[in-house]
Image (cartoon, rainbow, N blue to C red):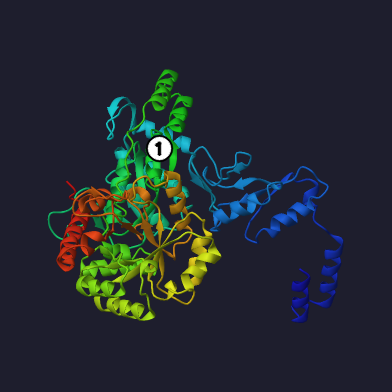
Amino acid sequence: MTELIDILEKHKKITKEMSIKLHKYLREVKAPVTKEWGDCVTSHSLPGEGILKALSSACTGIENRGVFLLAELSSENTEKKLNMASKNPNIITGFVCQNKDTFKDPGLLQLTPGVQLESAKDDLGQVYNTPEKNLAIKLFDIDAVKFGEFKTKSGTMTPVYFDLRVIVSYPDVMELLTVLLYDIVSNHKKYDHICGVPYTALPIATLLSVKVKKPMLLRRKEAKAYGTKKMIEGHYKVGETCLIIEDVVTSGSSVLETVKDLNKEGLIVKNAIIILDREQGGRMNLESNNVYIDSLFTMTELIDILEKHKKITKEMSIKIHKYLREVKAPVTKDSFEDRIRIPFEKRAELSKNLVAKQLFNIMSIKKTNLCLSVDLTSTVKILELLEKVGEYICLVKTHVDIIEDFTSDFISRLKQLADRFNFLILEDRKFADIGNTVSLQYQKGLYKISEWADCVTSHSLPGEGILKALSSACTGIENRGVFLLAEMSSEGNLISAEYREETVNMASKNPNIITGFVCQNKDTFKDPGLLQLTPGVQLESAKDDLGQVYNTPEKVILENGADIVVVGRGIVNAKSPEAQAVVYRDALWKCYSKRISGKLE
């Protein structure tokens, strides 16, 4: 106020006398001190954590004071607000918000403004939302919730059935449902498209798309027999994200079918918004497939509302609660369509690691997913072999420390062959030491691996430091990558399921350096931008005297999800390595082509 008055006086907008009068008023008249009587106050988080520190320090000597942080009034990042609040627990009373999933701490309060018994909006634009219970009652009144004996899509029998198809005849219910779902959708900031699960969720998805101003995609239940024959209609780019809208989830199978078709087009799906979660295993099934749901109602909440408002008897409520406890939907196994059914050229666009991008593109162009393991001790024999088979492979795997006549000239000639035949070089070093030692092993010594190997293999045993060491050693070198060993093909190896999961988790924190995993199973990881490198392959199943187990191309690609297959002795020891390389290339590519076609029977 002082600055404003001084500016107005200086520009002769007010007299000097008026200025003196106002300054005197400001010195003498103060507003009541809030901290003396307000038990709690509301506050924006926009200024940052300092505002909470200021309010907290202002309450020194006064025990019972608190702050409700506005979490949803503006477009501020809700996650940042929650994080800010978590650092100042003694001053935070709760949040001013509209949604139950805004925060999870049971020791905080949700303060929700704008409620009346019926939807309304006043002259100043204040919207009063109908609570979810009123929607539940309306759904019952229009026969969208039915009681009796019904069979669900997953095959289970149920005493209650949720039929949202009728709501298209009730515009007021459609509008109310859209408003309530909009509050949930608004918490999801990072998505490019909305897609409704056909067919019931399509009108709801359409209304939400218009309200949130996000483009909608239309998934068909079956492809047209004419025209483009597309399953997904709309304009999109590979790598964009899609938010799914569904009416009811029992097992989650309908959502997963939609996820599968979207993944085939290179779209990423991580979240789904559901009207009703039947609480029969669908949420768990979806989460096991990396799809996370937010629901407007759970079945328990819906039944409790209807019982409370005497829409159903207490006996019916007890029956349904008992049913929910005892009957679960069948487990929906991961279809892995987000990885093994997506063509290599589309997966290249999803890769964060440049070596992975290169490999996907090389495989697509050369039509080969064959990696040759040259376990030979002579540089002459290695180079002669690559002259013969270089055009049939996408990757060569070396063990440089077994070579008896290693020279820098060998590396120069190896790189020339890689450039001529368009394949990459993998040094199978299997790094496993502390970070500093690994950094030296990678860059220094006789072999100077970092200067010529496009990618290397590494154990995860030493922890995340090994990836940081390899990454920092690549500074100034663009195209370098790491295949982490998540599984081994040798009989009796000590790698456990827990070790495998921790390895994948470690990789997810270092996406730019990770090319993929050395593993045997398709469910080891799910990121379609990474590669599965699988060793231990021959045209016929076998096991050698040292415990190395060999599987067939069909098994490793069709059943186990391999992207690149490593073949060594099957080609190296053949009478005609060139002819055998062609046989392996054709067999492996045929399996891959069959896999992406979806015709696995």
Front residue of 572/58: it is 572
The residue that mark 1 highlights is: 277
Please give the name of the residue rendered at 31% of the width and 64% of the height, measured from the top-left corner: 375
Q: Is residue 90 above or below residue 396?
A: above
Callout 1: helix, strand or loop? strand
Q: Position of residue 369 (x, y in %)?
A: 25, 63
Q: Is residue 186 above or below residue 317?
A: below
Neighbour class for label 1 at 10 Å: few (<14), some, many (≥20)? many
Q: Is residue 530 visible?
A: yes
Residue at the farthest top position? 315
Q: Quadrant of residue 20?
A: bottom right
Q: Is residue 532 above or below residue 495?
A: below
Front residue of 480/219: it is 480
Name the residue type under label 1.
Asp
Q: Position of residue 228 (x, y in %)?
A: 17, 60
Q: Is residue 171 visible?
A: no
Q: Position of residue 391 (x, y in %)?
A: 21, 72
